[in-house]
Amino acid sequence: MEKGAFEGWLETVSATFLTLNDQQRNQSLDHLISLSGAVQLRHLSNGLEALLKRDFLRLLPLELAFYLMRWLDPQTLLTCCLVCKQWNKVINSCTEVWQGVCRELGWRIDESIQDASHWKGVYLKAKLRMMQLKDQEAFETSSLIGHSARVYALYYKDGLLCTGSDDLSAKLWDVRTGQCIYGIQTHTCATVKFDEQKLVTGSFDNTIACWEWSTGAKIQQFRGHTGAVFSVDYNDELDVLVSGSADFSVKVWALSAGACLNTLTGHTEWVTKVILQKSEVESMVHSPGDYILLSADKYEIKVLLMLLFYTFEDITTVIPEESIKVEQTLFPLQVWPLGREINCKCLKTLSVSEDRSISLQPRLQFDGRYIVCSSDLGVYQWDFASFEILRVIKMQDPANLSLLSFGKVFALLFDNHFLYVMDLRTEAISGRWPLPAYRKSKRGSSFLAGVTSWLNGLDGGNDSGLVFATSMPDHSIHLVLWKENG
């Protein structure tokens, strides 16, 4: 058929085709396909693929492609990487997408790293860690053996664990190696706290003592309580030590001198926890940098503001200027502190029931912004700026489930049989780990959480070291640690 005649015929057929309904059009196409040979069918196949199977990811602007990627779940993203090289390239270039899926898993994000392939790798590692938590494969256990009597007190800091025992000794252990670094003779230890140079112990003999690690010598003793000392905390900058006792009182001491600066009353039960911490928030009654003292008994948490008063005298005519050793950053050059007084103003008393029908449980936690404590109803979180209850996490068996530590993303809890990791965004249990028949102190002194930075979000480096420690009936210490190379 000549070209002109063909074009006329095609125009007539096209006009007629447009007048048909859908069923007639389909029948017409089926008839044409049945009359087609191999060349026509191949042409039809190529044409339909271009029309019906468009690669939208290749055709879209990169910004729109990234936007669409955000709506896909991580497993679908990984599957899309296998479609073709172009899809793999686009998906592996979307930093925000991979940062987002890492964040959903509770991973801490460093916004300065904009390498998408880095965050894809982080996601794969994060996914593996979360699967290990779920499958009870994230942790491993170890034991510390060395005490000959019941271990009542534990304290962890920077890879080191201190244990205080009824065998009249305290030991400092390297958690990684399991080696005992120091062992010194003490009194019975109900509570301990240490740093690089010294150890502070509270005892069932109603006293507090400060010991030097390197020599084992007692460098200070604090007498004044009439009941066992269940909790201590101190601050070297203030030269202050605080203690809570079974005599229902809290005492404030001069750390270096051993003198009692103040005795605080108001509790009607054993004071089982004291915390000395700087405020990090502003409110009508406190400012950032103010020193805050928390004391807790079975039913109440008292929040106190520490007020320091100094007495000065002009000494320029008494002592030569060159012999004055006062740091100018603390005091003016021409004054010398003769003494000091520490008063504590009660800002608030917190409780979970006015009629004392609901008990608080260890452990009390305060980071300068939030106060957290578990109770017979569940875990309570207060905002330190307003003292309002921000959150109550109610659990199936709160009387037996105890709080170890509370972060921004995860919380660590345990009961008589298991250690639990809770995702605080959903309040779902992300994983659990079996525990042996350990010795659980009602005061919370014989068990603790180890490294807690991962509770604010895993980052690929903080999932290492000690997770949990508790004393055992055979006087050993049971350790739960992150399994390496997760």
Image (cartoon, grey):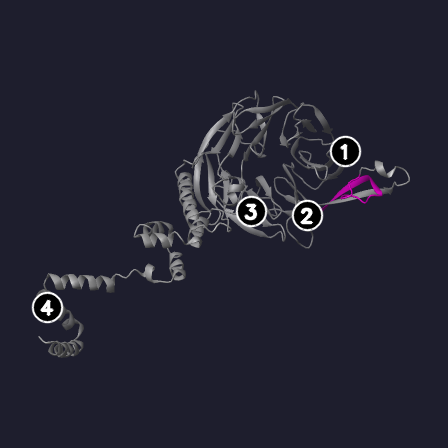
Closest to the camera, between mark 4 and mark 3, is 4
Residue bounds of the magenta highlight: 326-347
Query: Measured along the vertical axis of the image, is residue 388 above or below residue 294?
Result: below
Q: Amino acid at mark 2?
A: Gly
Quadrant including the C terminus: top left
Give the percent coordinates (x, y) of residue 223: 74, 30
Q: Which mark is residue 31?
A: 4
- Distance of label 4 from label 1 (alpha carbons): 106 Å
First reached walking from the N terminus: tag 2 or tag 4: 4
Give the percent coordinates (x, y) of residue 221: 72, 28
Per the image, the residue denoted by label 1 is 259
Q: Is residue 266 magenta?
A: no
As drawn, is 109 to the left or to the right of 93? right
- Distance of label 2 from label 4 (alpha carbons): 86 Å
First reached walking from the N terminus: tag 3 or tag 2: 2
Which of 367/376 is in front?
A: 367
The local secondary structure at tag 3 comes to strand
Give the percent coordinates (x, y) of residue 167: 61, 21
Give the percent coordinates (x, y) of residue 271: 65, 37
Query: Measured along the vertical axis of the image, is residue 21 above or below residue 257?
Result: below
Per the image, the residue denoted by label 3 is 380
Q: Amino acid at mark 1?
A: Ala
Q: Which mark is residue 289?
A: 2
Few, some or many residues within 10 Å of mark 2 (<14, 14–19, 20+): few
First reached walking from the N terminus: tag 4 or tag 3: 4
